[in-house]
Image (cartoon, rainbow, N blue to C red):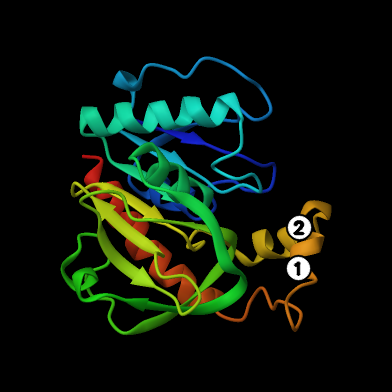
Amino acid sequence: MRVLAFRHAPLEGIGSIADALERHGIGCHALDLYERPEPVPDLAGYVGLILMGGAMSANDDLPYLREEESAIREAVNRGLPVLGICLGSQLIARALGARVYRNAVKEIGWGRLDFTAAAASDRLFAGFAGAETVFQWHGETFDLPAGAELLGSSGACRNQAFRVAGNIYGLQFHLEVTPQMIEDWCRQDAACGDAREVEAPIDAHAHAGRLAEIAGAVFDRWCGLLR
């Protein structure tokens, strides 16, 4: 079994999702269409679709983003589980007819995520209640697609996690990051402008232990959907 993953930047890999895939014996075919344009493979050969983050906007006039949106719609039509992180969640929303636009503020660094009542019975988030601290790095947001269930919100950005049709998930926050990834993002030139906007330096390890626990549970459960 293999999943197909779309990446959008050299330092935005699948992070701890890879650990969950390995635990479940699931392979991953990663495509970097932003760097190497190539045909999207036939989704009949995959059991799920993953879309990662990136610095571009889901609204940018980039042919590969439109190809990815087509792949999302095909995956939905095939009944394949889909998981989108940050830009990936925005692409899912856009592919399903919702609007993507600039958020009132940028969310960068560790922040509070409040789970909704619907999360308590969700297949990925059951058992999580109240609030957790997660990692954010985004300046845009989206409206929920038709039929979507809201699973999580933050004070600065209402639509943080949603589910459509039982197996399509969009996460605006970065559940997949490791301390090394956070440190790399803070160092990379493309992110420097954003990083300078935070009031204090970002401690990559501040909540990393708990984030890894949440990620392990959520991504293991998502892998369970692939079977």
Dot 1, crowdedness within 10 Å: few (<14), some or many (≥20)? many
Residue at the image point whose x is 69% and y is 28% from the top = 35
Mark yes or no: residue 1 visible: no
Q: Amino acid at mark 1?
A: Ala
Q: Amino acid at mark 2?
A: Ala
Q: Can you say whether 218 is above or below 76 in the image?
A: below
Secondary structure type for disc 2 = helix
Left/right placement of residue 140 relative to residue 121 reads right
The front one of 24 and 85 is 85
Proximity of marks 1 and 2: CB atoms separated by less than 8 Å: yes
Find residue 113 and report its horizontal and vertical position in percent. Answer: 42, 77
Q: Can you say whether 58 is above or below 196 in the image?
A: above
Find residue 65 and report its horizontal and vertical position in percent. Answer: 53, 32
> What residue did someone put label 1 on?
195
Left/right placement of residue 180 relative to residue 221 reads right
Q: Can you say whether 3 is above or below 63 in the image?
A: below
Left/right placement of residue 181 relative to residue 20 reads right
Q: Can you say whether 161 is above or below 68 in the image?
A: below
> What residue did someone put label 2 on?
191
Mark yes or no: residue 40 visible: yes
